[in-house]
Amino acid sequence: MLERFFGLEAHGTTVKREVVAGFTTFLTMAYIIVVNPNILQAAGMDYGAVFVATCLAAAIGTLIMGLFANYPIALAPGMGLNAFFAFTVVGSMGYSWQTALGAVFFSGLIFLLLSMFKVREWIINSIPLALRYGITAGIGFFLALIALKNGQVVVDHPATLVGIGNILSPQALLFGAGFVIICALYYRRITGSVMIGILLVTVAALAMGLVEFEGVASAPPSLAPTFLELDIAGAFQLSMLGVIFAFLFVDLFDTAGTLVGAAERGGLLDKNGKLPRLGKALMADSSATMAGAALGTSSTTSYIESTAGISAGGRTGLTAVVVAILFLACLFLSPIASMIPSYATAPALLFVAVLMTSGLRDIDWNDVTEAAPAVVTALAMPLTFSIANGIALGFISYALIKLIAGRASQISPSVAVIAALFILKFIFIGAD
């Protein structure tokens, strides 16, 4: 049955290899089940409910990807967008988390429509690479700032905005140790390096009496505090357009980049270098975002960590199904998740930031009309504490610099329209 449904022989794989690949992928991304609730509780959301929503959203999205698109790609709530959700949309802009969930739902719905009507290729191909690299790096810097704050290394300062905290405190030392361990294990290609680092810091915190042991397994917490609590009407207002666009834009490019990168690693591209069943894969991703919003979590997206499972031999949706089953099994491990402190998950945020900023190397630094907008985008995100503002300033600066430099022909119609809309938003609505 598995052979017929997933086409294992045609893809040159076996059940055993797919199962091993599924476990490998899960171990590399399992950190999200503790990091995501830790971030979203800053928005006032119930930790236990978000823990359940994270596991269920990851399982549902990954199942859809495996059964519908037949790809070994796993999904879960995305890093960066969860921080934008909690610290910018709710924390800085003052919207309720219910309204923010409504915005996530709308972004997923628009993503689904773009996938159904095949507009996504035109949008993806028309956005300059420099802006894509700048956006990814900016999200990385945004995560890094949050990580250093949670690790008590960076604190607010009345004169300089930010300053260094007490780096000799137990929490800061554990944060630093966790980051060093994760990086070293990742370099040595140890599977699950991020999760290992989080757990080691937590064990050390337990030994030092900084956290209390709450058990290992129990029945899953109640999902009721977040289930179907999204505020659709609240999100359906003009001032939320920038937020919805930010969720949509980042999810769209993150997903497209992950799918193509993972498929290339596994030799899943066709002879023309294109990804077969791309529409199905994007529809799986957008459907998962909508389901996640209904459950009570930020945008669900495809994870680049899936390449770990692909490198282990995963080639079909059976790998994804295994990952989904493992996420469901984690529902019973909430006691472990609930006692992991923020300074134990902060090293994971900083490590992900390192990976995300690496794309800056691909920018053409000899062309200031390309490099400058990318830098503006990357720096504006952490310094304005908003992914949406970073995207907006990036598009505006790109269009204006190209125009005044006499290179207007390099401004695609979509970039011109988006830049104009952002200018109008700043004039009539203001910044996020």
Image (cartoon, rainbow, N blue to C red):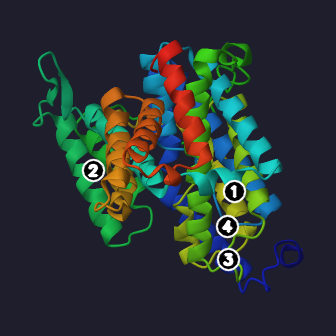
Q: Are marks 3 and 1 in contact (CB under 8 Å)?
A: no
Which residue carries the number 1 mark?
121
Q: Amino acid at mark 1?
A: Glu
Q: Secondary structure at mark 1?
A: helix
Q: Which mark is residue 54?
A: none
Q: Nearer the viewer, mark 2 or mark 1?
A: 1
Q: Amino acid at mark 2?
A: Gly
Which residue carries the number 4 mark?
72
Q: Secondary structure at mark 4?
A: loop
Q: Nearer the viewer, mark 2 or mark 3?
A: 3
Q: Secondary structure at mark 3?
A: loop
Nearer to us in this view, 274 or 159 = 274
- Compared to residue 89, the image places residue 212 above or below, namely below
Q: Residue sitting at 82 percent across and 49 percent down?
A: 116
Q: Nearer the viewer, mark 3 or mark 4?
A: 3
Q: Amino acid at mark 4?
A: Pro
Sequence-wise, which precedes: disc 4 or disc 2?
4
Q: Looking at the image, can residue 429 be seen?
A: no
Q: Please state the horizontal and vertical placement of residue 161, each as a whole percent of the image.
A: 19, 22
Q: Residue sitting at 71 percent across and 79 percent down?
A: 270
- Is 19 positioned to the left or the right of 175 in the image? right
Which residue carries the number 3 mark?
268
Q: Amino acid at mark 3?
A: Leu
Q: Residue sitting at 32 percent across and 65 percent down?
A: 185
Q: Which mark is residue 178?
A: 2
Q: Please state the horizontal and vertical placement of residue 241, each as a whole percent of the image.
A: 61, 24
Sequence-wise, which precedes: disc 3 or disc 4?
4
